[in-house]
Amino acid sequence: MATAIVVQKYGGSSVADLQKLRLVAERVVRTQKAGHDVVVVVSAMGDTTDELLGMAKQISAAPDRRELDMLLTAGERISMALLSMAIRELGGNAISFTGSQSGIITNDRHVDARIIEVRPYRVQDELARGKIVVVAGFQGVSYRREVTTLGRGGSDTTAVAMAAALDAEYCEICSDVDGVYSADPRVVPQARRIGTLSYEETQEMAESGAKVLNAQAVEFAKERGIAIYARATSGPLPGADPSADGTVVRKNPPRMPGTVVGVASERDVLVVESDAGAESLLTALDEHHVAGKQLYVPTNTAHAALVVSRENLHDAAGVERAMHARFGDRVTFISGLGAVSAIGAGINATYANVRAGLSVLRRAEIPCSGISTSSFRITWLVPDADVAQASRALHAHFIESGAPRVP
Ligand code: ADP
Ligand code: ASP
Ligand code: MG
């Protein structure tokens, strides 16, 4: 019988220096010794990606997106080669591959590319030879043979896509935190680890700013039915019950409708308001590769409102200038705002949760400048400086206060 394949992803903080890289190498070798075929997806060391972006910005206020991809992919290339060497030092037999060599094929949307297909033939060949395969995360190659990156946090996506293509037993996302919490534990000290989450809950958490898992990665896992184990790099290998010391994301039976599972936030979002007509506005935003998150367009007026994440928008000032040149005063950009969201299935069955959140914010004297909802999420727009306090207040109400507990 073929050995089960396990895909492990190690984030930037887990490979931030050579000592940490050696610890990762040990964990990888231990996994192989436990009887698995191991594919490791690795991120750039520490803050390398931010540092590379910083250098690009010093050279050019609006760096060319293709050249940005050339630059950023170098980060993961460094860690893959060093990790492969570290594994070999421990007596393991490892080989590293870039995204392109691993067969990660993407569209050609530079800086924020989507994986179209994975052709992992070289990975499979090396696994068959008993090797540990180390793959550079966050990168791929387009059909036009251009090097691309998958958007910030994209190594998670590489790992899940690889797990799906290899029909892996599970995909482990190893980080500095031992799972998905009910809020960012750095912001909300009372946050609790969630043992199991559904794909939909996790996707909404990720899209609302919970960095621990990348939203596109969760979307991929959901499509292919891959179980994701979010775990601490410093923790043990998954045992019989991986939810005991981490978070398992998989198809889950529904919870009691209306239960809030978590609070997530995103700092420094950009709100675009316009009465230029929705179609021309959206066309212009697409031309500038601006991916909107929440859109509100009443069709009987020309007024549209849109919330944009700055994460993969590397030239916000240039986009603003271009939009003003095109639409004049009919478009307004509002900055200085953050988005705080509560997530849970059926959370909007009534308006009770929306209203509760508003009164929590009012009591905390935090002004709310917008609300949007989906069937899994309520988002309140608040001043950027108040995001942490709003997260704590909403978490205290929805999670800590003994409101119906997650079963
Ligand atoms: P990596 O480099 O391993 O990919 P990230 O920085 O992308 O790590 O994600 C891990 C970080 O995500 C944690 O350090 C934590 O502060 C943050 N985080 C935000 N929201 C959550 C949450 N709900 N649960 C756990 N961690 C979260
Ligand atoms: N190194 C990339 C980033 O910082 C990808 C990742 O870490 O997942 O966004
Ligand atoms: Mg990450």
Image (spheres, rainbow, N blue to C red):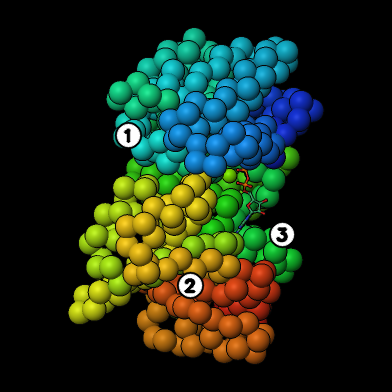
Q: Residue at x 34, y 33 (%)?
A: 108
Nearer to the camera, 91 or 77: 77
Per the image, the residue denoted by label 3 is: 186
State the mark number for residue 107: 1
Q: Nearer the viewer, mark 2 or mark 3?
A: 2
How far from the left and from the top, in percent, is residue 72?
A: 55, 31
- Badge 3 local density, few (<14 within 10 Å), some, or many (20+)? few
Q: CA distance from mark 1 to mark 2?
A: 30 Å
- Dot 1 or dot 3: first in sequence order is 1
Q: CA distance from mark 2 to mark 3?
A: 20 Å
Tell me if residue 166 can be seen. no
State the mark number for residue 379: 2
Residue 73 is left or right of residue 1, and the answer is: right
Give yes or no for contact between labels 2 and 3 (Cβ–Cβ under 8 Å).
no
Residue 182 is left or right of residue 249, and the answer is: right
How far from the left and from the top, in percent, is residue 82?
A: 67, 19
- Element type at mark 2: strand
Assess mark 3: CB under 8 A from ligand 1?
yes
- Dot 1 or dot 2: first in sequence order is 1
User: Amino acid type of disc 3?
Assistant: Arg
Q: Residue at x 54, y 58 (%)?
A: 209
Residue 124 is left or right of residue 211, and the answer is: left
Assess mark 2: CB under 8 A from ligand 1?
no
State the mark number for residue 70: none
